[in-house]
Image (cartoon, rainbow, N blue to C red):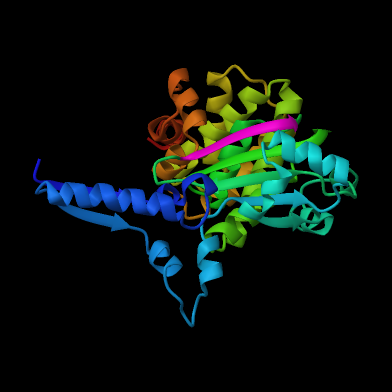
Amino acid sequence: MKRVLLKLSGEALAGEKKTGFDEATCIGVAKQVKQLVDDGVQVAIVTGGGNFWRGRTSETIDRVKADQIDAPYLALGADLNETEKSTVLSLLEINEADLSSYQVITVTNADEHKYLDSYLDSSVIGTRALSSVLIEKKDKGNGIKVTTSNITYCTTGMYQNALATAGVTDADVRVAGPFNISGTAALVGAMEAYSNMTGETLKAENADAATEELVTTSDLGEAIGDKGQAEELVGAVKEAVVSQDLSDPEEIEAVVDDAAKEMNIQLSDEDKQKIVSLMEKISSLDLDVDSLKEQAKDLYNKLESLDLNINQEQVKGFFDRIVSWCKNIWNSIFG
């Protein structure tokens, strides 16, 4: 081997600190590269732009801010008391003495109401912000991975699917409550933390659709008595709507009916209309089905294993049969 392309991520250079640069790690990598060059190997190094910013000063972005790019972000519920905070940090496997290694923000009850008031009764949202989230940016291809502690209402798949809709990519997300809580408001913390961590402002319409998606899926899980089936149904319908570019409510309803039949799920008219309304909103977003599958791998791998037969030809075929039936009636009357 005479030539090597070496990709160095900020995470690889951070060492055990997991943020910024670790000098010993950098020196160790440099020595290994030098050894390769001394042995006659041509080495090309690719590194992210953030790493250059971390090593210099700028009138646009200071070094402290640059060191925060992609650092782990912790979004704590603003109303946690000290005992509750200690419990949450323990569940997230964070030593309180090491908090300086994390970028910490707080999510207030007002923040939760801002996102959730349109979809949940105020009494359900409550008056205390308790949900807490740890989020870390990962390399491309990682997808969104979610783990939860003391979350009773939302599943990991629900979070994955909603975060993918919001525009979150390649991140490890851990959600925890100080005791059993629904976890619906945790989505707010995850989106806020991701935006702060990456410097990317999530589109308001995507964040809104993601919030509705999480609430709708959670409510559906309660209604049909199976949270796993609820996340699979919503995921399957979303995949069909996005991949087939469906926006007509009747076509979307046909997909919902088809998916529910394939999964042997009995939907009430109210639940069906909630899903159709959600999918109409999702259809207006600039979503890519391959990206959705990449980010919510666990969910879409489950859907693939179910071998569902939901496709555009079926939907079109449904309406084609209606048109054909009308034509036959017309021809039988008027020749």
For the view shown, which residue lies furthest in the bottom direction?
Answer: 59
Per the picture, the main secondary structure of the magenta-coloured stretch is strand
In this rendering, the answer to whether 92 lies above or below 113 is above
Q: Residue at x 75, y 26 (%)?
A: 223
For the view shown, which residue lies furthest in the top direction?
Answer: 264
- Is 262 placed left or right of 327 in the picture? right
Is 144 in the magenta? yes
Question: Residue 240, percent across and down?
Answer: 47, 37
Which quadrant: the C terminus?
A: top left
Question: Residue 121, percent across and down?
Answer: 86, 46
Question: Residue 198, percent across and down?
Answer: 53, 59
In this rendering, the answer to whether 311 lies above or below 117 is above
- Is 166 placed left or right of 58 in the picture? right
Q: Is residue 106 visible?
A: yes
Q: Residue at x 53, y 50 (%)?
A: 168
Is 115 in the magenta? no
Q: Is residue 274 visible?
A: no
Snapshot quadrant of residue 155: top right
44 or 135, nearer to the observer: 44
- Is 218 placed left or right of 41 in the picture? right
Q: Number of marks in the image?
A: 0
Which quadrant: the N terminus?
A: top left
Q: Residue at x 84, y 40 (%)?
A: 84
Question: What range is drawn magenta here?
Answer: 143-150
Question: Residue 332, percent across and down?
Answer: 42, 30
117 or 295, nearer to the observer: 295
Q: Residue at x 15, y 51 (%)?
A: 37
